[in-house]
Image: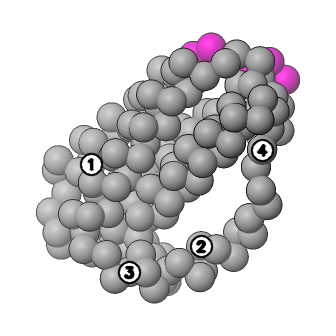
Amino acid sequence: MTLDPSFNERNRASTERIRALAARLSDDDLRRPLGEHWTVTIALAHIAFWERRVLAVLEATEQVGKLSAPSIDLSINDLLLPFWAAMLPGQAVRLAVESAQRVDERLTGFPPALLEELYAAGPRWVVRAIHRDAHLDEIEVG
């Protein structure tokens, strides 16, 4: 697979979606349930966590000059659920926006060969909009 250079714009657009949601959602909106165990706040904290994970992988990958993504089990979402639920809504919003923005900035100047390697390993490492937008769609539909 070849990386579509529009990924930066897609990522920026998803970050702006988070920012726009943050501007219009009240604390009550942020506490709204999304499914059985999640709320809007939890979804945003989840986004922030995975953005920070991508930042760590980008740092390690650039440092060693090849993909460096230690394995992490998706059960981490269940393990972190009580921590995310304990967050104040505003904290989750701030972390989601800041984390997404940092990833966008980091990817913009990332070495092209390493970007291609990351993308080949999994498009979500680079096209963060895929993950963000899936959760933002849930939030906006709910």
First in sequence: mark 3 or mark 2? Answer: 2
**Residue 39 has which mark?**
none
Residue 82 visible to the viewer: yes
Q: Which circle marks residue 68 in the picture?
A: 4
The reply to whether callout 3 and callout 1 are in contact (CB within 8 Å) is: no
- Label 4 secondary element: loop
Q: In the rendered image, is residue 137 in sight?
A: no
Q: Residue at x 60, y 48 (%)?
A: 56
Badge 1 amino acid: Leu
| Image: magenta residue range | 1-7
Quadrant in which the N terminus appears = top right
Q: Earlier in the sequence, mark 1 or mark 4?
A: 1
Task: Report the Cα–Cα distance between label 3 and label 1.
Answer: 19 Å
Colour scheme of the rendered structure? one colour
Q: Nearer the viewer, mark 3 or mark 1?
A: 3
- Residue nearest the viewer, comparing 26 with 80: 80
Q: Is residue 5 magenta?
A: yes
How far across and down, in percent of the image, does residue 21 sit? 26, 48
Q: Which residue is mark 3?
A: 85
Image location of residue 132, percent across then percent down: 50, 47
Task: Estimate the spatial distance between the alpha carbons at disc 4 and disc 2, rounded to whole Å.
Answer: 21 Å
**Residue 46 percent across, percent down from the top left:** 48, 63
Q: Which callout, 4 or 3, points to the residue nearer the camera?
A: 4
- Residue bearing the label numbered 1: 21
Magenta stretch prevailing secondary structure: loop
Name the kind of residue labelled 2 in the image.
Asn
Callout 3: few (<14), some (14-19), or many (20+) C-alpha neighbours within 10 Å? some
Q: Give the labeled residue for mark 2.
A: 77
Mark 1 or 2: in front is 2
Q: Amino acid at mark 4?
A: Ser
